[in-house]
Image: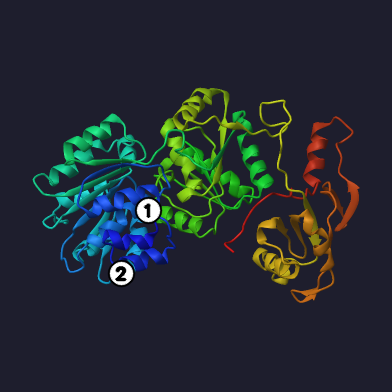
Amino acid sequence: MNFSQLRNEGIREDVLIGVNKLGFIETTPVQEQAIPLILSGKDVLVQAPTGTGKTAAFGIPIINMSDVNAKCTETIILTPTRELTIQVAQELKKMASGVEGLKIAPIYGGQNLDRQLAYLRQKPQIIVATLGRVVSNINHNQLKLGGLKRVVLDEVDEMLDIGFREYIDEVFSKFKGKNVQTAMFSATIPPEIVGISKNYQKDAVCIKTTVAGQEIPDIKQYVLHISEEKKYASLKEIIWQKGYKNILVFLNTKAGVENLNKRLNKDNINSLCLHSDMNQRDRDMAMKLFKAHDVNVLVATDVASRGIDVEGIEAIFNYDIPYIPEQYIHRIGRTARANKNGVAYSFCTPKDKKNLELCENTSKNKLTEFIIDGVTNNKKDGQKFAVPTVRFFMNIGSKDGAEQKDIENMICAKVHMPKRDIYAYKIHDIYSFVEIDAKYKDEILAINGIKAFGRVLSIEVAGPKKVATKKSNNKRSNKPVGKPKNNNKQADKTKKAKTSKMPEQRFYHNERKQ
């Protein structure tokens, strides 16, 4: 169904203004089925895969039914995580951009208390909140329920996975005796969710848009059978091979996330981390930068596996195989939003084989083996997808005022190439090295001699990495430093101390949004 046809379902023109601004054209199956039912006032229990437009499925009818003149909260949308709360509130505000006077407020733990109370004093018609925070606000008499008409539970299975069943029961106890329409959305509907629906919903219509074996459409799924110590090298190798600029890497522990993030940044791979021990300001900033593509890698625990709708995520890496098989589906779904395709890589160590089998059974998909010669535990020949590159020397550096973005802008303007084909930089005081897709070699060399950064540009193909050299009388010696010929350990140490070792070239991406 075309979104313009929603007029026939009773959607107002001012609501369609916001929908059109978002570029929605055709409704997804869950939207087509859920919107008319919610508009008619029915309770619904909806099962749908991640990334299928669930927010619009409940957001559009709720915005349409909201009374902008109401001086009370009419709808509460409950989510399991702060990140999802922020995400849903932002999406609803975009959808409601044509509806004058409608107030939508996010409420969650870790938020500035004064700001939160200010939101509530404005009496927003729609509140998006985490379960624990809304219970606290009700108990402290900060949130009034007198005008409540609708409640939405988003990602109910995730609420149960993280132990929020008591909160669900407590929230519904606050609505007892009130005529409140309830909509529940979940990626899976196990018996416990069916029981919750029977307890708290009235004649709920069940909508299932999941087709067996099709929960994860258009996602290429690979597995690397690998040892623990080779995971990091494999991650960097695949990033380099494929030229990925926007990826999500999932680990099972907060400590693992912190350690991997430090290693990536030490190797000049532009990375940030996200986990539940971070304060809310840092978490918000990490998501903001990742969404803007100002960082290339987000390393996260499963706090980011649900509800984070970021456009342009090229690949998902399961650095650790998830403990809970269903979590695998939510993780990799971040790279295939609203019927777009994507790719996911899972690193499987010998101890992870059982968990991998459970993930494959849950996703109803056998993962394809991805082989890196000399790294993965497989002797077969595999395709490596390597991108051939050429390393160039330039006679400009930081003392010329040349920063990475300036150099890449200069190259792309002169050669007419996309920034994604520039793979690595090393900028020194008076010279730089740039690694570029080999297909541009002749065009890069053709700009030799132009004026750039106040000097005549000298550019040439760089030779192989030089061996560290000794210094003598403040001049470089061309004699390579080799191993000492004697066996005197003290002499070895003295000789090494005097050796000026050049830093190794390091691979990194630091691409900003084009």
**What residue is shown at x 31% (from left), y 65% (from top)?**
15
- Establish if 271 lies above or below 330: below
Picture coordinates of residue 144 (x, y %)? 14, 56
Residue at 53% across / 51% down in the picture? 313
**Dot 1 corresponds to which residue?**
280
Where does residue 401 sit, x and y in percent of width and height? 69, 71
* Rendered-image quadrant of the N terminus: bottom left
Residue sitting at x 73%, y 71%: 400
**Disc 1 residue crowd, few under 14, some 14–19, many 20+, Cα 10 Å:** some
Residue 313 sits above or below residue 204 on the image: below
Kind of residue at badge 1: Gln
In-image side of 449 versus 19 (left or right): right
> Does 80 sit above or below residue 194?
below
- Say how the picture is coloured: rainbow
- Local SS, label 2: helix
Q: Which residue is mark 2?
A: 14
Residue at 66% across, 57% down: 420
* 184 on left or right of 84: left
For the residues bearing labels 1 and 2, Cβ distance under 8 angstroms: no
User: Tag count in the figure?
Assistant: 2
Residue 111: x %, y % from top left: 31, 56
| Res 461 visible | yes
Crowding at mark 2 (Cα within 10 Å: few <14, some 14-19, many 20+): some
Q: Amino acid at mark 2?
A: Asp
Q: Which mark is residue 111?
A: none
Closer to the camera in the image, 165 or 397: 165
